[in-house]
Image (spheres, rainbow, N blue to C red):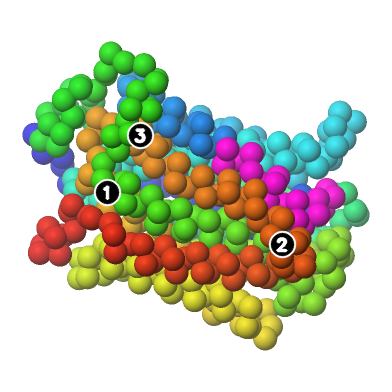
Amino acid sequence: MEKRKLSFWDIWNMSFGFLGIQMGFALQNANASRILQNFGADVHELSWFWIVAPLTGLIVQPIIGYYSDRTWTKLGRRRPYFLAGALMASVGLVLMPNADMFIAVMPSLWVGAGMLMIMDASFNVAMEPFRALVADILPSDQRTLGFSVQTILIGIGAVIGSWLPYVLTNWFGVLNEAAPGEVPTNLILSFVIGASVLVISILITVFTTKEYSPEEIAQFPESKLDETGIVEKSSLLNIFSDFRKMPATMRQLSSVQFFSWFGLFGMWVFATPAIAHHIYGLSLDDTHSLAYNIAGDWVGILFGVYNAVSAVFAFFLPAIAKKIGRRNTHAFSLVVGGIGLISVYFMPNENWLILSMLGVGVAWASILAMPYAILAGSIPPKKMGVYMGIFNFFIVIPQIINALIGGPMVKYFYGGDAIYALVVSGISFLIAAALVSRVKDVDDVVLIKN
């Protein structure tokens, strides 16, 4: 039995929930540091507040993957997990900018940090089963298209989420200034809208997508790669043995992922203070002024630009990969992104930063698609979920390391100037590009020949 080919719109509906996930994720990435600074966090403390989220993902992801491989309900195999993750993330989105409501119980800064943890952990719970869903349902020759469609929807959702605070203020007159210790109204409203879109988009995927049953999966030829059966008589501790036995391709991709996500984390955490100080000329301790909030809104625009570029570039990824291979496509994209991040240091004003974000968008599109397209061909389908969860180690570990050392580096090595954290992120992308040459893509030769 072979997996059936799906139409473009079937693949679109299957991945549509990613639009809402990434809209919420973009709101978090562009604004969480700004919100925490509004609640009183210093710039060198920001990465420490972000650390709980990847730590939670490190623990949660392989467990979610393990159980999603062994789940079968009326909603299917993967859908219960990303539905639950979306609902939890929506709660975090609503409560984070409203953390000052709980000031009678504990400081708003700690409530906000807790909501950041809930959001990021929940986005992780939702995202990785989505990755496994594409690998479950699509045949090998449609996987690059499948992950590229996900990237397109990620880009669309992220553009909406990133630009929403700016649009609410400049098009609809919603206030973007607040008293010290409070969050501007445009951010509060943006997060509520994001939570609503997240739930609706996930429900569209849940009700329009049909998963293969365990019996059908057992009949696929690639199932012979795994002789243990879809429901093993084993314990959760098998995750550790699966980690030791991970496919060679996954092991090779791990270093690429490490430097890619080390760079991304540095950009997300430090972009707002870096640009506010280096480009807008604001003092290091200015986090409550109207000028700082204008800089923060512009960072949202810039994040929207790189996500818009990623959505467009994702349309071309399957054709480029077919021409030059997935590895070369990914290496090229990372080089372009690295140059883009480093160029932020040299740009004369905020408008020129759009050019920098064009490069970041090319890299982001490839980071979201190529590693998963390469990886999927090397994983036994009956362990797709657990290996996608284990693969998440190489996303969250670099973020944890950056969270631990990023703040002290900004404080003690960069003199409080976060722009150098963005330069280091760009260098990290270039290292990742060099390491792609070590990766073996088992489907790449077939892909290029066809």
Q: Residues within 10 Å of mark 2 (few under 14, many from 20)?
A: many
* Spot occupied by residue 129 in the image (x, y as percentages of width and height): 39, 36
The rendered magenta stretch, by its main secondary structure, is classed as helix
| Residue pointed to by mark 1 | 249
Question: Quick one: 123 or 348, which is closer to the camera?
Answer: 348
* For residue 301, above or below residue 51: below
Question: Quick one: 28 or 4, which is closer to the camera?
Answer: 28
* Spot occupied by residue 366 in the image (x, y as percentages of width and height): 38, 62
**Mark 3 element type:** helix
306 with respect to 216 (left or right): right
Which residue range is magenta in the image?
38-55
Query: Is residue 139 at least partly visible in the picture?
Result: yes
Queried whether the magenta region covers residue 258, the answer comes back as: no
Queried whether the magenta region covers residue 46, the answer comes back as: yes
Task: Give, as a three-letter code, the residue at label 1.
Answer: Thr
386 with respect to 156 (left or right): left
**Mark 2 element type:** helix
* Contact? badges 2 and 3 (CB < 8 Å): no
Q: Residue at x 81, y 54 (%)?
A: 42
| Residue pointed to by mark 2 | 410
Query: Which quadrant, please, contains the N terminus?
Result: top left
